[in-house]
Image: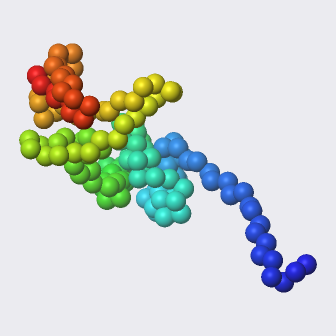
């Protein structure tokens, strides 16, 4: 074998997926330390731990002190949600200029997705679209 040839060895890594039930069992068996170990090793996400905490609270299968410890740990590791709950860009403000890319779905004619929040348009409202020339489209309520 040539010494200048780099060989790569591909190995398949299997990741065990644990559910909130597994976290509940770890909590009831090993307490909060068992849940912390699952989280530290990356075996469960913060969302799974939060769901397990809700389920344990609903079933009342533990002492109030232990439940409070689990709930506070779940809150501690759960990321804080920021923003206004919308995905993507903020709606354009009055006077702002935006660039949109033409899209096409399965060979359809090109179109653009235009956010109409700035015009306070609700679903089903009629809009007036004026094609002034080859480069100008005007949208009004």
Q: How many marks?
A: 0
- Judged left or right of residue 84, residue 2 is right
- Judged left or right of residue 36, residue 14 is right
Which of the 4 quarters of the picture holds residue 56?
top left
**Colour scheme of this structure image?**
rainbow
Q: Nearer the viewer, residue 11 or 135?
A: 135
Residue furthest to the bottom = 3
Residue 46 location (% of width, % of height)? 41, 53
Residue 30 location (% of width, % of height)? 51, 58
Residue 138 location (% of width, % of height)? 16, 29
Q: Quadrant of the N terminus?
A: bottom right
Q: Nearer the viewer, residue 4 or 103?
A: 103
**Residue at position x 11%, y 22% in the image:** 141
Whether 124 is drawn above or below 40: the answer is above
**Residue at position x 13%, y 35% in the image:** 118
- Judged left or right of residue 24, residue 79 is left
Residue furthest to the left = 94
Res 140 seen here: yes
Res 73 seen here: no
**Residue at position x 17%, y 42% in the image:** 92
Residue 125 location (% of width, % of height)? 17, 17
Residue furthest to the front = 133
**Residue at position x 80%, y 82% in the image:** 4
Whether 133 is drawn above or below 128: the answer is below
Q: Nearer the viewer, residue 128 or 17?
A: 128
């Amino acid at each position: 074998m040539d010494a200048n040839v780099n060989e790569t060895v591909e190995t398949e890594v299997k990741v065990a997926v644990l559910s909130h039930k597994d976290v509940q069992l770890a909590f009831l068996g090993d307490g909060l330390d068992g849940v912390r170990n699952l989280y530290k090793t990356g075996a469960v996400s913060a969302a799974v731990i939060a769901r397990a905490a809700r389920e344990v609270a609903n079933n009342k299968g533990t002492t109030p002190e232990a439940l409070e410890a689990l709930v506070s740990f779940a809150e501690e590791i759960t990321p804080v949600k920021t923003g206004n709950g919308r995905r993507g860009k903020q709606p354009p403000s009055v006077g702002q200029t935006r660039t949109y890319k033409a899209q096409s779905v399965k060979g359809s004619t090109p179109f653009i997705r235009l956010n109409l929040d700035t015009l306070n348009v609700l679903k089903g409202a009629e809009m007036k679209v004026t094609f002034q020339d080859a480069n100008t489209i005007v949208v009004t309520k």
